[in-house]
Image (cartoon, helix red, strand yellow):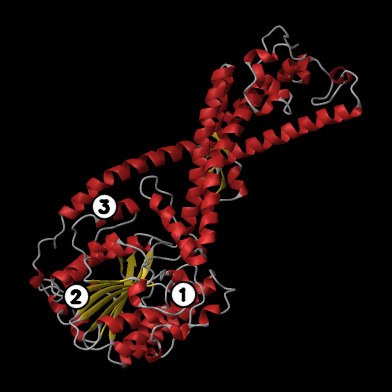
């Protein structure tokens, strides 16, 4: 029998039996429940323990005191509503506890796990008095809410960048994402997305906190049932942990997701805080730091050397069964066309420092020889005086240029790459319609560069040129036009209104990559000569929506030249002949390219591994 002389469990017990009343807050004074009906006390034990044969949740004559049917119905409705809200609160807390942080693991089955942290939290709450219990539930709920926000952020990062959000290094990616939305879809979409993100970031912790408090009250109101459930689930957790039981491959039933997440976050923060020191050690060991200009790049004297990044041109474009047939055909035909015109080429793969986005990280990695895989490292790197490939060419006497077709604001980081000339959107003088990522088509970018930097009488130039027609969201690309007709880009007017039904799809991605590659091949055919050396490569793989899971970070890289002496210098690299590397082609870390390139074309020897 229920001991009615025992002090009531304040608002906790009342909340467990009358969800429609004081269940939603903790503002009821602790003494307020002292005079409540006996149902508040008997609810904890349940019908069987109190000796009451009335089904739990039923409304009796003594409870209604002769109230009419409407009052009885209202009481039942309040109880049903309270039970539904409590169930939703439990579901939200469960999601926060066990939901995976990677898109590839996300499924309903992933939620059917036993969170050890949840069991420990309930056990703690059961032994605490009412006031400390409310405080503990609030703190635990707030922490869990923040963890859920980070998990949602992780899902976004894993979808696009195939990795987790970095608490130290990745905050500027949020700004880059907003800029991408503005450039690709307009300011209204950017503002809307920011508003939704801010509201969600504030609302989720609040909702999880309220849910945790509600569940704490319900657990205290049904203490014996809760204790038995926790004990049974704890035993099940131990058994599943020993057996290694899994519902979803990679996700054990005996979950410790929160603990592992907190540990990983702490390790991530520590690594981020220590990265500046590690970077300083790497920079101090640069073997080319003090090499005089006259001893650098001697085998390329008199050449125009172009480093051209093809946006999102990843290994998947050459090997995916849906994408590869046309991409491979373009590269193979391009190899034959250039060979007929006297050009040779060698190709392989580089493992980029990023995937799905963050092109500037890949650019910095290739040009600096330092792996740059997060924004914090990028920021520290560009504040240094480290020698880049751009700087090496400038030291050796070349004019240097940066061609940034989507740049429409100040870019102080450009100084790190030591350009004599920086061509942003304004300097390129484009007058036609904008295409993917609010940029001109690749053919216009190369045409404008050609007219400004490779005209008659110009001294040799080294240029870094990102081509953006294959940038997400992969909008329709224009057809190739005669190079003499490009002019200021007005020739493209009307083509931006082409069918956009495939935008953002694998088909649109394939078309965009094919367009960029055809543009480069056509450029060499039209403007190439004995003094052109073209290095073109992907900056990173496209987003996971294109690659699928576990695609890796490899991107193709190719060197094209008409002078056979240029490719003789890299014969020892083992790269494959032609524009299209096959799956057995060498794979290098992208950060190794700078040093290999400087050694190959320096005065030390004719070939280097």
Contact between marks 1 and 2 (CB within 8 A): the answer is no
For mark 1, give the secondary structure: loop
Direction from residue 443 to residue 204 in the image, left or right? right
Residue highlighted by disc 3: 380
Image quadrant where residue 608 sits: bottom left
How crowded pointer 2 is (Cα within 10 Å; few <14, some 14-19, many 20+) is rated as many
Q: Is residue 520 above or below residue 230?
A: below
How crowded is the residue under tag 1: few (<14 C-alpha within 10 Å), some, or many (20+)?
Answer: some
Task: Give residue 500's position: percent from left, percent from top.
Answer: 57, 74
Kindly indicate the quadrant of the structure image that contains residue 499.
bottom right
Q: Residue at x 21, y 68 (%)?
A: 389
How far apart are labels 1 and 2 at the CA level? Answer: 29 Å
Q: For the point 47% across and 72% down, which residue is it?
A: 436
Residue of label 1: 434
The kind of secondary structure element at disc 2 is: strand
Q: Residue furthest top?
A: 5
Q: Secondary structure at mark 3?
A: helix
Which residue, given by chain and number where applicable, does mark 2 sit on? 399
Nearest to viewer (mark 2 / mark 3): 2
Badge 1 or badge 2: first in the primary sequence: 2
**Residues marked 3 and 1 touching at CB (< 8 Å):** no
Spatial distance from mark 3 to mark 1, Cα to Cα? 33 Å
Q: Is residue 239 above or below residue 389?
A: above
Judge by depth and name the residue closer to the eye, 44 or 529.
529
Give the total number of marks visible in the rendering: 3
Q: For residue 100, say whether it is visible.
A: no
| Image x and y of residue 562, in percent | 24, 87
- Which x, y percent locates residue 141? 54, 32
> In which quadrant is the N terminus drawn?
top right
**Image coordinates for residue 81, horizontal then vertical, percent:** 75, 34
Residue 109 in the image: above or below residue 304? above
């Amino acid at each position: 029998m229920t001991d009615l002389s025992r002090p009531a469990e304040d608002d906790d017990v009342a909340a467990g039996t009358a969800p429609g009343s004081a269940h939603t807050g903790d503002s009821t004074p602790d003494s307020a429940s002292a005079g409540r009906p006996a149902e508040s006390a008997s609810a904890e034990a349940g019908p069987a323990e109190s000796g009451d044969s009335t089904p739990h949740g039923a409304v009796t004559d003594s409870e209604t005191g002769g109230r009419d049917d409407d009052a009885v119905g209202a009481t039942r409705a309040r109880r049903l509503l309270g039970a539904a809200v409590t169930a939703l609160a439990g579901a939200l807390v469960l999601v926060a506890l066990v939901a995976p942080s990677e898109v590839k693991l996300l499924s309903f089955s992933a939620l059917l796990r036993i969170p050890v942290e949840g069991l420990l939290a309930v056990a703690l709450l059961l032994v605490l008095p009412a006031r400390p219990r409310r405080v503990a539930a609030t703190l635990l709920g707030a922490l869990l809410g923040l963890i859920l926000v980070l998990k949602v952020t992780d899902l976004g990062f894993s979808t696009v960048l195939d990795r987790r959000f970095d608490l130290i290094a990745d905050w500027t990616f949020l700004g880059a994402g907003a800029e991408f939305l503005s450039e690709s879809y307009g300011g209204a979409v950017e503002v809307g997305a920011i508003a939704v993100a801010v509201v969600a970031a504030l609302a989720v912790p609040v909702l999880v906190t309220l849910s945790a408090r509600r569940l704490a009250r319900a657990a205290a109101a049904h203490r014996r049932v809760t204790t038995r459930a926790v004990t049974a689930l704890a035993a099940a957790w131990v058994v599943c942990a020993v057996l290694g039981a899994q519902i979803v491959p990679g996700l054990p039933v005996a979950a410790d997701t929160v603990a592992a997440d907190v540990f990983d976050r702490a390790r991530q923060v520590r690594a981020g805080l220590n990265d500046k020191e590690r970077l300083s050690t790497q920079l101090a060991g640069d073997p080319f730091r003090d090499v005089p200009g006259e001893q650098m790049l001697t085998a390329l004297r008199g050449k125009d050397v172009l480093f051209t990044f093809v946006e999102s041109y990843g290994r998947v474009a050459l090997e995916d069964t849906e994408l590869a047939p046309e991409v491979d055909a373009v590269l193979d035909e391009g190899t034959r066309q250039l060979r007929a015109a006297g050009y040779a080429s060698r190709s392989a793969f580089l493992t980029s420092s990023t995937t799905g986005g963050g092109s500037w990280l890949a650019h910095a990695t290739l040009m600096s020889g330092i792996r740059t895989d997060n924004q914090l490292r990028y920021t520290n790197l560009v504040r240094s005086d480290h020698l880049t490939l751009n700087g090496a060419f400038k030291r050796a006497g070349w004019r240097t240029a940066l061609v940034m077709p989507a740049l429409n604001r100040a870019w102080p980081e450009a100084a790190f790459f030591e350009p004599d000339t920086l061509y942003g959107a304004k300097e390129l003088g484009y007058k036609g319609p904008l295409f993917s990522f609010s940029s001109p088509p690749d053919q216009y970018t190369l045409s404008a560069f050609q007219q400004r930097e490779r005209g008659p009488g110009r001294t040799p130039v080294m240029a870094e040129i990102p081509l953006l027609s294959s940038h997400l969201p992969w909008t329709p690309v224009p057809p190739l036009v005669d190079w003499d007709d490009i002019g200021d880009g007005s020739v493209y007017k009307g083509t931006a209104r082409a069918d956009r039904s495939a935008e953002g799809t694998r088909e649109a991605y394939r078309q965009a990559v094919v367009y960029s590659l055809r543009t480069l091949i056509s450029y060499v055919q039209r403007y190439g000569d004995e003094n052109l050396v073209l290095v073109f490569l992907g900056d990173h793989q496209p987003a996971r929506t294109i690659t699928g899971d576990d695609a890796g970070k490899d991107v193709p890289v190719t060197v094209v030249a008409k002078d056979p002496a240029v490719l003789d210098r890299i014969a020892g690299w083992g790269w494959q002949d032609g524009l299209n590397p096959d799956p057995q082609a060498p794979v290098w870390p992208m950060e190794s390219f700078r040093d290999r390139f400087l050694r190959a074309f320096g005065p030390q020897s004719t070939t280097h591994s």
